[in-house]
Amino acid sequence: MNIVIGNHIFDKMENFLNKNTKGNIFLITDENVGKYYSDKILHYLSNFKVNVYTLIPGEENKNLNVVKDIYSRLIDLNCDRNTVIISFGGGVVGDIAGFVASTYLRGVDYVQIPTTLLSQIDSSIGGKVGVDFKGYKNMIGSFYFPLATFIDIELLKSLNKRNITSGVGELLKYGLIYDYNFFEFLSSNIDNIYNFDNKVLKIAIEKAVYIKEKIVSEDKRDKGIRKILNFGHTIGHGIESFYNFQRFNHGEAIILGMIYESFIAKEIRLIDEKYFNEIFKVLNRLVNPEAFNQKEINEILNKMTYDKKNEKDKIVFILPVGKGKVEIFNDIEINLIKKTLSGDWIWK
Ligand SMILES: NC(=O)c1ccc[n+]([C@@H]2O[C@H](COP(=O)([O-])OP(=O)(O)OC[C@H]3O[C@@H](n4cnc5c(N)ncnc54)[C@H](O)[C@@H]3O)[C@@H](O)[C@H]2O)c1
Ligand SMILES: O=C(O)C(=O)C[C@@H](O)[C@H](O)[C@H](O)COP(=O)(O)O
Ligand SMILES: [Zn+2]
């Protein structure tokens, strides 16, 4: 895949588009990104005819109504198959723009310019695109790879703390599923990431992109090994959607998911108490787990029964089995999931 990582790389994006596009550009962004960077990106796209579609920010807008509105605009503008869609924003913009690109006129080219830490290290890589539906995460979507991804670290300087935390969550995930040294590196550099230390950010982004690309290249359509990228997501997606996407952003929910799922792993002795405590200490610094009551637990479990990994009515989990290693499980007892979410272990 064409992935460029660096600082101030819009000129590279401009060169790439000059060489690889014959049509007009349809730029999808959101209000926050537009506020900071619309002048800058339009400057670099001044050779092209550009139409801009600006989303209202937020996960609650990652839905088919917004997709339909974008199709309408594309048709009103008579955008043909040579149109190139540019996604300029975080994961919400990227998932929507990629899905529109994969379906409009049966597919047009698109380019990702991710603007959040999470989108730079995760959602702009790997070709999963789509939207939420009926309150469940990413239920409608496809696998559709961008022509190229331009990761400009400079763009992260305007992010707020919670959105950095969200990216740090998915970064730590790579360490826990694939490379324990990377987990240790990140754990000791969390403050540097919050302080936009460029050297640390570059190492972290390059490593994460390398790991994700490697896993995806072995299993593009999520039938086997790719599922490990879903560590923390069985419970994390459940919690994110239980709160109607209002309380935790994606990465925060995945941090919680990784805490609860690591607890499950400890309870069934896949990992020892010492490793669990190590994971807990790092993740709990970012987001604190909660205790859910019975009614809430049942609602979260309901959300989890629609997880895309599930097979034959079994909820599938990716669980740690050692340092930097996870495996796939489909036989976790419902009572253990309930105990985990009840949180009675948190303060012991
Ligand atoms: N496709 C995938 O493989 C994949 C992987 C991980 C996550 N996701 C999805 O990505 C989404 C989360 O992405 P996200 O965390 O980027 O959220 P987001 O797109 O909602 O962005 C978070 C917030 O940051 C703002 N923002 C974006 N860039 C900014 C910048 N440079 N400066 C200031 N503010 C900025 C946005 O307007 C928004 O308010 C979720 O929907 C999740 O399901 C998809
Ligand atoms: O790329 C993948 O594969 C992932 O699982 C990455 C996840 O971080 C991401 O949240 C993804 O969107 C989840 O996919 P889903 O298939 O569980 O909806
Ligand atoms: Zn995720």
Image: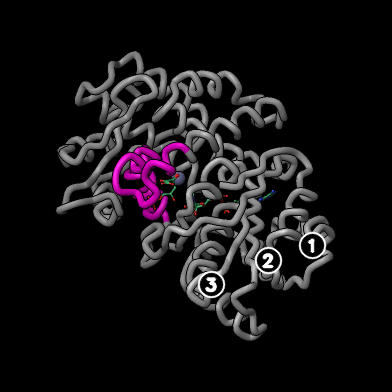
Callouts 1 and 2 close, C-beta under 8 Å: yes
Magenta residues (range): 214-243
Q: Which kind of residue does numbered mark 3 sit on?
A: Val
> Who's the residue at 61% across and 52% down the image?
148
**Image coords of residue 137 (percent x, y):** 39, 57
Expressed as whole percent of the image width and height from the top left, the position of residue 203 reads 63, 27
Q: Is residue 161 magenta?
A: no
Q: Percent position (x, y) of residue 146?
A: 56, 56
Q: Residues within 10 Å of mark 1 (few under 14, many from 20)?
A: some
Considering depth in this image, is 343 or 270 the residue closer to the camera? 270
Alpha carbon separation for disc pair 1 and 3: 25 Å
Amino acid type, mark 1: Leu
**Marker disc for residue 45:** 1
Q: Which residue is mark 3?
A: 66
Q: Nearer the viewer, mark 1 or mark 2?
A: 1
Residue at mark 1 to residue at mark 2: CA–CA distance: 10 Å
Q: Which residue is mark 2?
A: 27
Q: CA distance from mark 2 to mark 3?
A: 15 Å
Please indicate whether residue 244 sits to the left or right of residue 325 in the image: right
Image quadrant where residue 18 sits: bottom right
